[in-house]
Image (spheres, rainbow, N blue to C red):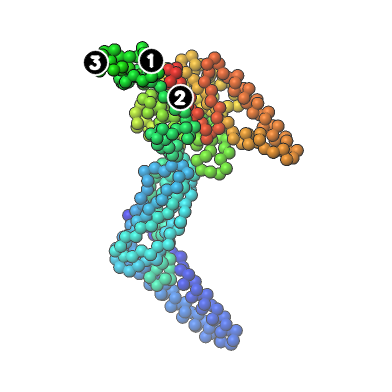
């Protein structure tokens, strides 16, 4: 990496010399020094300073360039929204002597930084390591431009401004902590800690899994008599839920999903929580052996995302690669057009999960869309419920304005609940949850549907 010169600014020492010289000459003139003498002293001082500064600048720049300075960043493969990560820097320069520097790395504006700029002393012929921290505040692609380094010249009369390093790009994904915690708790059989119910069933489902010893409570009709006679003890067949089924996620990205009561916390917006829930549900479904697909709607025409159903461990990474940069837009969500798109693309019967932020004025259009989807698929409607409404409903009645706010919140919630219930058909599947609870509730409903064999 070859640094690129940007410019030069006077060092504090140069400014101090000019200020001190001016102050001394002013005092000398006040006490009676002849103007001609003062002018001669000023010209000589200024000429000496200019000559010294020119020599210092040319010599320092040449030495810096001859040292072929190099900057190497050690970046993670990807970032997670709201998760602090440390960025390691490695600097080296050939030659002898030391350089006093101040380095500022040009990171993406969406990354909150800590410990920048860095004050460094770079020794010739040695490698220096330093670090700073970043916290991503939004999902999507982020760039790291060449850093700016401010180098103190040899005689400390100038500060050279150079660019060093290369441009690099990374992606910021939703926080994988929820998926990682689910996997850890599942292995430790403590899923109830995150609100996910566990089921222990034997002999259910339709796909044969294995033979095992009979235990009290097992169905007698599942006894394998041939194995029982051979081993001289009761043996039963165990079954598992059918695999090779399909879960299709239909995610609203329209203006309804722009609601946000996150209290300025990165990664806690409603849509960020929706993507966390999508990721968690996709992980669980893929682990169960099902296919997972997704489609967004509500964005401007041509910008919708379509992820065809896939299986396997790599499908989750591919799904997040498709959805990681999606943001809600201020456009209207056409539920019926989205349902028609799913019907065209998804021929196989699937569990279609519609994730939206429902309002009572959306009832007629959403009802038509759900009716169309239910003609072929099993449909689960999941709607987000704003936490701020619940907080307003339970606020103390401390003033007349507070009474009006509480009453308005109750009326809004009652109207919304009534409209939500009107969407329910016979055996309809519905989830109404706050964003933070959406992931656990979707997983619970998916597992119960699997256990009941309804897909």
Q: Nearer the viewer, residue 283 or 124?
A: 283
Q: Residue at position x 30%, y 17% from top?
A: 235
Name the one closer to the observer, 301 or 435: 435
Disc on res. 446: 2
Element at label 3: helix
CA separation in Å, label 3 and label 2: 39 Å
Residue occupying the point 55% across, 30% down:
433
Judging by the rendered image, the residue that carries numbered circle 1 is 219
Residue 33 in the image: x percent, y percent? 56, 87
Instruction: Write down the residue under mark 3.
Output: 230
What residue is shown at x 53% (from left), y 23% (from top)? 430
How far is mark 1 from mark 2, CA to CA? 25 Å
Please determine whether, in this image, residue 393 is positioned above or below residue 33. Answer: above
| Precedes in sequence: disc 1 or disc 2 | 1
**SS under mark 2:** helix
Mark 3 Cα-neighbour bin, 10 Å: few <14, some 14–19, many ≥20:
few
The quarter of the picture where residue 230 lies is top left
Q: Are marks 1 and 2 in contact (CB under 8 Å)?
A: no
User: In this view, which residue lies farthest toward the left?
Assistant: 230
Report x, y in % for residue 39.
Answer: 52, 81
Image quarter where the C terminus lies is: top left
**Would residue 424 appear left or right of 290 to someone viewing this image?**
right
The N terminus - image quarter: bottom left
């Amino acid at each position: 990496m070859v640094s690129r010169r940007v410019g030069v600014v006077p060092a504090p020492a140069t400014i101090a010399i000019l200020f001190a010289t001016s102050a001394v000459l002013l005092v000398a003139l006040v006490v009676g020094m002849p103007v001609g003498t003062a002018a001669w002293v000023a010209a000589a001082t200024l000429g000496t300073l200019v000559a010294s500064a020119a020599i210092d600048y040319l010599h320092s720049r040449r030495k810096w360039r001859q040292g072929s300075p190099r900057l190497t960043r050690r970046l993670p493969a990807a970032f997670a929204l709201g998760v602090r990560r440390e960025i390691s820097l490695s600097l080296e320069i050939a030659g002898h002597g030391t350089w006093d520097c101040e380095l500022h790395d040009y990171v993406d504006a969406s990354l909150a930084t800590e410990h920048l700029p860095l004050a460094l002393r770079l020794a010739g012929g040695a490698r220096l390591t330093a670090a700073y921290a970043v916290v991503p505040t939004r999902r999507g692609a982020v760039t790291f431009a060449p850093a700016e380094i401010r180098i103190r010249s040899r005689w400390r009369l100038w500060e050279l401004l150079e660019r060093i390093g290369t441009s690099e790009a990374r992606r910021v994904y939703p926080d994988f902590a929820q998926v990682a915690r689910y996997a850890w708790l599942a292995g430790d059989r403590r899923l109830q800690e995150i609100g996910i119910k566990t089921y222990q069933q034997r002999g259910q489902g339709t796909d044969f899994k294995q033979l095992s010893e009979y235990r009290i409570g097992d169905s007698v009709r599942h006894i394998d008599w041939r194995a029982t006679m051979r081993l001289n003890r009761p043996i039963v067949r165990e079954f598992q839920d059918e695999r090779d089924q399909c879960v299709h996620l239909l995610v609203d990205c329209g203006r309804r999903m722009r609601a946000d009561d996150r209290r300025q916390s990165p990664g806690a917006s409603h849509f960020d929580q929706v993507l966390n829930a999508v990721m968690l549900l996709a992980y669980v479904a893929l682990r169960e052996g099902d296919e997972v697909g997704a489609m967004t709607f509500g964005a401007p025409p041509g910008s919708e995302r379509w992820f065809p159903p896939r299986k396997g461990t790599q499908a989750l990474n591919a799904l997040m690669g498709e959805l990681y940069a999606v943001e809600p837009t201020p456009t209207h969500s056409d539920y019926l057009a989205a349902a028609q798109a799913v019907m065209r693309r998804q021929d196989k019967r699937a569990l279609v999960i519609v994730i939206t932020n429902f309002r009572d004025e959306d009832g007629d259009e959403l009802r038509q869309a759900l009716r169309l989807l239910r003609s072929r698929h099993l449909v689960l409607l999941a709607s987000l419920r704003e936490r701020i409404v619940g907080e307003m409903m339970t606020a103390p009645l401390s003033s007349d304005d507070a009474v009006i706010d509480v009453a308005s919140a109750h009326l809004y919630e009652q109207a919304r609940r009534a409209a939500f219930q009107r969407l329910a058909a016979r055996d309809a599947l519905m989830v109404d949850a706050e964003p933070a609870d959406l992931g656990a509730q979707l997983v619970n409903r998916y597992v119960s549907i699997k256990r009941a064999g309804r897909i």
